[in-house]
Every structure is written in structure tokens, then in C-alpha cells.
Image (cartoon, rainbow, N blue to C red):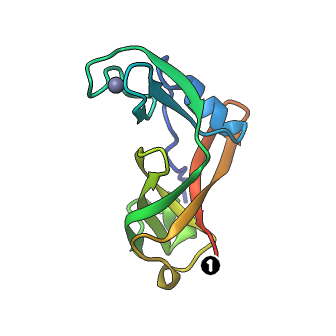
Amino acid sequence: MSEFKKPQPSPTAWTQSFWQNCASERLMLLRCSTCSAHHLPTRRVCSCGAINFDAVESVGLGEIISYTEVHRAPDPAFKAELPYVIAIIELQEGVRLMSNIIQSEAKDLGIGKKVQCVFETLDETLGVPKFKLIKD
Ligand SMILES: [Zn+2]
């Protein structure tokens, strides 16, 4: 049987520092220097039209906007993790991202539930932001 590996992020020159900061457990965002809107690092132009951003660290807190529990692996590499949760998270800064909710059972999740960022470190240059439920 051949060994399957989960796909990993493919950093670009534009996103490399984001993934590297995640390896250091820092979730970095871009903040527009004109209107202060926050964005993920893939953004090059703000919705206000500005192109200048400051790098800022997210507080790592947010809420679940949507989620689903996966029971059938899309690839054999994911089989060992079944079932797992994929969610859209809105950070307090207003940025939405797709990630996993870990260390929780789907029955405990819900729209609007509060989550905090935790990191899965793949190597010294590559970390992935994941989220876990904040207990009430
Ligand atoms: Zn802006």
C-alpha cells in the first residue's frame, strides 16, 4: 500500500511570512493603512482601493459562521482523522477564513459559537491555523 500525505499549503512570496508566523504561533493579518479594514495576506488591494497595509497580529478569537462534519475522506490521507470538522470562522477583526475545528465534537458546535486559534506546526517554516471551541 502506498503512503498518502495530506496536501500542505504552498507558500508564495506574498504568503510565506503568514505561514512562517503560524509556525511561531502568530496569526498575522494585513490592516489597510487608509481605512483600517483587516484582510488575509492574499489581499493586494483593499475594498477602499488602497494598496498599503500594515502587518498586525490577530487576537486569534472569532466565531463559527458555518461548519460541516466530514465522514467520508476526500483522499486516503485524511482517513485517519475522520470524522473532522471544516468551518468558516470570522475573526474579531472581521476576516473570514476556512479552517478546521479541532478537539471538539460536532454535536457541541453551532453557528455563532466562540472559537480560538490554535496552531498545527508542520515544520519551522510552515504552520496552519486551526480553531478550538471556547468552553462557556
Ligand atoms: Zn482600506
The residue labelled by disc 1 is: 136
- Please state, as top left, top right, bottom left or bottom right, where the C terminus lies in the image: bottom right
All told, the count of numbered labels is 1
| Quadrant position of residue 56 | top right
- Mark 1 belongs to which amino acid? Asp
Q: Residue at x 56, y 63 (%)?
A: 115
Q: Position of residue 3 (x, y in %)?
A: 57, 53
Eyeballing the image, is 85 above or below 105? above
- Please state, as top left, top right, bottom left or bottom right, where the N terminus lies in the image: bottom right
Q: Residue at x 60, y 59 (%)?
A: 116
| Towards the viewer: 11 or 103 | 103
User: On the rendered structure, is 112 left or right of 108?
Assistant: left
| Towards the viewer: 109 or 92 | 92
Farthest bottom residue?
A: 107
Eyeballing the image, is 129 above or below 48? below
| Quadrant position of residue 69 | bottom left
Q: Position of residue 103 (x, y in %)?
A: 63, 71
- Identify the secondary structure beneath mark 1: loop
Q: Position of residue 101 (x, y in %)?
A: 53, 65
